[in-house]
Amino acid sequence: MIDASRGSEALHKFFTEAYQGTLVSDFWAAYDSVFADDYQKCLPHLLRELLKVDDYNSDVEWADFSRQLKRLARDGMRLKKRKDFSPARYASRIKLIHRRLCKLADETYADGDAARLGSRLSKYRDHLFTFLDTPGVPPDNNHAERQIRPAVIIRKNSLCNRSEQGAATQAILMSIYRTLKLRGLDATKTIAGTLRTLLQTGALPALPVENVADG
C-alpha cells in the first residue's frame, strides 16, 4: 500500500481488523496502534542504533549500557539458533534473559542516550524477545524489508509516482507480483494466462495453488 501519510491513519487503512498473528516490525511508533495477537520488535534495528550512538557518545554510563544491551540481544539471538532450541527446553535461560532486560529497563540513567533507550526498553519489554517464546517468529523484520525492496527500487528509479492513480496501480501490481513469486510462480506467464482466461470466459480464474514460499 502506497500512502501519503506515514502516521497511524495509513496503517488503519491497511489493518482493517485485528491481526491474527505476531506483528514483526521496527520501532516506528505508528505500529503501536495496530491490534495484533502479539508483537516482536526488530532487534537488529536496536543494535544498529546502539552502534550509531557509540560513534559520538563516549560517556562511561552509555558505554556500560550499550555493552550490556548488545550482549543481551546477541545472547537471545544465539539461543534461538541452537539446533535443540525450544521454549520448553530453555525456559530457565529465557527467564534469565527477561530478567536482564527488566533490570536494564528499570534502571535510572543520567546519560541522555541511555535514558532514551532505557525508556524504549521499558515500553517494549514484552515485545523484544517474543521470538524466544513463540515458534516461527524471527528476531528481525528482514523478511518484510526484502519483500518491499523491489517496489522501493522502482519508485526511486521512476522518480516516484506521478499521481494517486499511478501509486494505487503500482501498489496493486507489486502486491500481485510478490504474491506470485512467494508462491513459486512465474509472474509474467501467470498474469498472461489469467488475462487470456478473462478474455475467453469473462471471469478471472482462481489464484494458482501455492507451490513454495521462499521469497
Image (tube, rainbow, N blue to C red):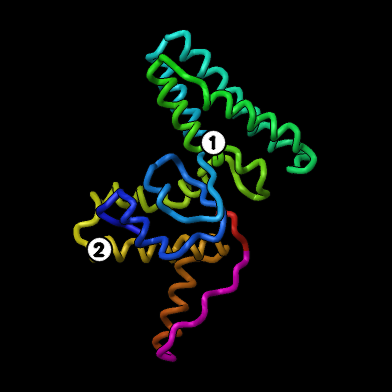
Residue linked to disc 1: 125
Start-end of magenta stretch: 200-211
Q: Nearer the viewer, mark 1 or mark 2?
A: 1
The x and y percentages for residue 52 are: 41, 22
Camera-side residue of 63 and 118: 118
The x and y percentages for residue 113 are: 40, 20
- Residue lying at the far bottom of the rendered structure: 201
**Could you say which quadrant of the image residue 188 lies in?**
bottom left
Camera-side residue of 96 and 204: 96
Name the N-terminal-most of marks 1 and 2: 1
- Whether residue 196 is situated above or below residue 172 in the rendered picture: below
Residue linked to disc 2: 166
Describe the element under mark 1 as helix, strand or loop.
helix
In-image side of 211 versus 116 (left or right) = right
Residue beneath the point at 48% across and 71% down: 189
In-image side of 113 versus 189 (left or right) = left
The x and y percentages for residue 55 are: 41, 16
- Whether residue 115 is situated above or below residue 144 in the rendered picture: above
Task: Give, as a three-letter code, the residue at label 1.
Answer: Arg
Predominant SS along the magenta part: loop
The x and y percentages for residue 72 are: 61, 26
Question: Which image quarter holds the C terminus?
Answer: bottom right
Task: Give yes or no for residue 203 being in the magenta stretch.
Answer: yes
- Whether residue 12 is situated above or below residue 44 in the rendered picture: below
